[in-house]
Amino acid sequence: DSSNPVTENCSCISNLYLHDIAPDRVVSIGEVLWDIFPEDTRLGGAPLNFAVHARKLGHPVYLVSALGNDELGRQAAEQIAALDLDTTFLQTGVSCPTGTATVNLDAEASSSFMIHRPAAYDAMPFSDSDLRRLKERHPSWVYFGTLFGATRPGRAVMNRVLDGLDETVKFYDVNLRP
């Protein structure tokens, strides 16, 4: 469309439509946690948020994380199931509590987070069988962030998945906070 300034000089884009592209299979690995605000509690964690948005764009998504054997874990599992994400690799009943982060807001509504550890995602088991089943799904790319790999057990699982999915594109979401 020559009236569109984004595509007017790029004929390859003008005939490209999202429905013509096969959706990529995505692995999103890392924390699922509850953000606890002064007046509200919301399910989140960067890998879950990313997974939800990728799914909304039509990509099949495999969420690799863990939830505790507690009420927050049960609520999270219920909400995640309603989001049309593949939860085959969402471990439940892990001995640590479901992840939480206390969110503090200052007078300008800027936020700071206190992340409570250890959390279920820190104790997530991931077996050879899990890796084999994940590879059988032929993901095109894998998303991971900084929080999950900040502990030795999380880093070990993350590296195992990244090494095992050696032909996938890796997307590293740097999330640095003061």
Image: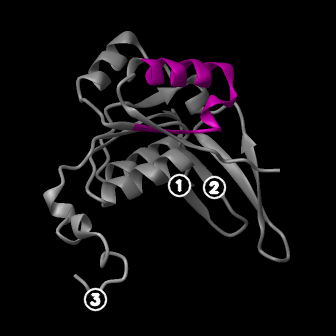
Asked if residue 103 is among those painted magenta in the image, a careful observer would answer no
Q: How far apart are the alpha carbons under marks 3 and 2?
A: 44 Å
Give the structural element (helix, strand or loop) at label 2: strand
Pick whichever of labels 1 and 3 is earlier in the sequence: 3
Q: Which mark is residue 102?
A: none
Identified by mark 2, the residue type is: Asp
Instruction: Report whether 110 appears left or right of 46.
Output: right
Q: Nearer the viewer, residue 3 or 48?
A: 3
Work out how far the residue at label 1 is from the one at label 3, CA to CA, in angstroms. Answer: 41 Å
Residue named by callout 3: 3
Outermost bottom residue = 3
Taking the spot 69% from the left edge, 30% from the top edge, the residue there is 150
Q: Amino acid at mark 1?
A: Leu
Q: Secondary structure at mark 3?
A: loop
User: Which residue is nearer to you in this view: 144 or 107?
Assistant: 144
Q: Is 70 situated above or below 153? A: below
- From the image, state whether disc 1 or disc 3 is nearer to you: 3
Using the image as rendered, state which of residue 140 and residue 83 is in the foreground. Answer: 140
